[in-house]
Image (cartoon, grey):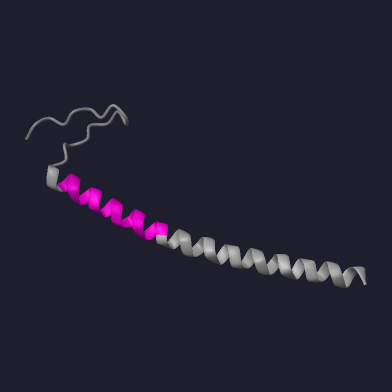
Amino acid sequence: MPEPAPDPQHGVNVPPVSQKGADLITDQTAAMAQRNSIKNKVMIRILRVNLKTTKAEKSKDITTFHK
């Protein structure tokens, strides 16, 4: 097995990754990113709805306050 080259980013000896391993990592990363983006979209939608309802409640409170 060849001596692992020092990784310039981390300054640690990282063993070389085979092409198959690299592809697997890339696939997993892509799948995770896809799942996260879906999760984020759902979270953003929930937050938007919450924001709208709180705004509506606040405006309702203001009108009742002024009466």
Rendered residue at 59%/63% (across/down): 48
Magenta part of the chain: 21-37
Q: Main secondary structure of the magenta part?
A: helix
Residue 32 located within the stretch drawn in magenta: yes
* Front position in the image: 21 or 36: 36
Quadrant where the C terminus lies?
Answer: bottom right
Corner quadrant of residue 8 = top left
Rendered residue at 17%/37% (across/down): 15
Q: How many marks are shown on the rendered structure?
A: 0
* Front position in the image: 67 or 12: 67
> Residue 66, position in %: x, y?
91, 68
Residue 38 located within the stretch drawn in magenta: no
> Residue 5, position in %: x, y?
18, 28
**In the displayed structure, does residue 6 sit left or right of residue 47?**
left
Question: Measured along the vertical axis of the image, is residue 52 above or below residue 23?
Answer: below
Quadrant where the N terminus lies?
Answer: top left
Q: Residue furthest right?
A: 67
Q: Residue furthest left?
A: 1
> Residue 53, position in %: x, y?
67, 69
**In the displayed structure, does residue 55 sit left or right of residue 24?**
right
Rendered residue at 53%/60% (across/down): 44
Rendered residue at 35%/54% (across/down): 33
